Image (cartoon, rainbow, N blue to C red):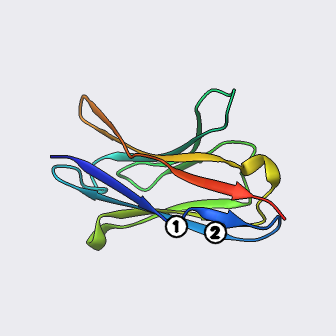
C-alpha cells in the first residue's frame, strides 16, 4: 500500500520559517518518482508549489521562488519543503504528491497557517 505521510505543518508568524516533510512508503521511492508539493487555499485551485525529478531537477512557482526550497533524502525516502520568509498568502493546505509511472499519489494534506 502506497502511503505519503506529511509532517511539520502548523502555525507560523509572518517572516518565519517552517519545514514540511513527506515520508514515502510502499512502492514509492523518491529517487524514481517525481515528487511535488502542492497547496490549496479555500476558494482557490490546487497549485503546484515545487517539484523535484528523479534526476534532481527542481521547479518552483513564481510566488515562492527565492523563499522555498524542495529537497530529498534518498536514504530516508523523504522529501522536504523548506519555507522561509513566509507570508500570509502562503496559508493553505499543503499536499505531498508522487508521480510514479502511470500512477499519481497524494498525501492527506497538512495545514500551514501564517498569522501573527
Residue bearing mark 2: 18
- Percent coordinates x, y for residue 9 in the rendering: 56, 62
Q: Are marks 2 and 1 in contact (CB under 8 Å)?
A: yes
Q: Is residue 16 left or right of residue 39?
A: right
- Residue 58 to residue 69: above or below: above
Q: Is residue 109 visible in the rendered structure shown here?
A: yes
Q: Viewed as shown, does residue 98 lie left or right of 83?
A: left
> Residue 77 or 52: which is nearer the viewer?
77
- Image x and y of residue 6, in percent: 42, 58
Q: Secondary structure at mark 2?
A: strand
**Residue underneath mark 1:** 8
Residue visible at 73% across and 50% down in the picture = 90
| Quarter holding residue 79 | bottom left
> Is residue 108 toward the left or the right of residue 114 in the image?
left
Question: Looking at the picture, how far across and down is residue 94, in whole percent?
Answer: 55, 48
Helix, strand or loop for disc 1: loop
The residue lying at 58 percent from left, 31 percent from top is 46
Q: Residue at x 31, y 46 (%)?
A: 33
> Where residue 34 sits: x, y (%)?
37, 44
Question: Is residue 83 visible in this depiction of the protein?
Answer: no
Question: Around disc 2, counting alpha carbons within 10 Å, would you say few (fewer than 14), some (14 to 19), or many (20 or more)?
Answer: some
Amino acid at each position: 500500500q502506497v502511503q505519503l505521510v506529511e509532517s511539520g505543518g502548523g502555525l507560523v508568524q509572518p517572516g518565519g520559517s517552517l519545514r514540511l516533510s513527506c515520508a514515502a512508503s510502499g512502492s514509492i521511492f523518491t529517487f524514481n518518482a517525481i515528487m511535488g508539493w502542492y497547496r490549496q487555499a479555500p476558494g482557490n485551485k490546487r497549485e503546484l508549489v515545487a517539484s523535484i525529478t528523479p534526476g534532481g531537477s527542481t521547479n518552483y512557482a513564481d510566488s515562492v521562488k527565492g523563499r522555498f526550497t524542495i529537497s530529498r533524502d534518498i536514504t530516508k525516502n523523504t522529501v522536504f519543503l523548506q519555507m522561509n520568509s513566509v507570508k500570509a498568502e502562503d496559508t493553505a493546505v499543503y499536499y505531498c504528491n508522487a508521480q510514479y509511472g502511470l500512477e499519481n499519489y497524494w498525501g492527506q494534506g497538512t495545514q500551514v497557517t501564517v498569522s501573527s
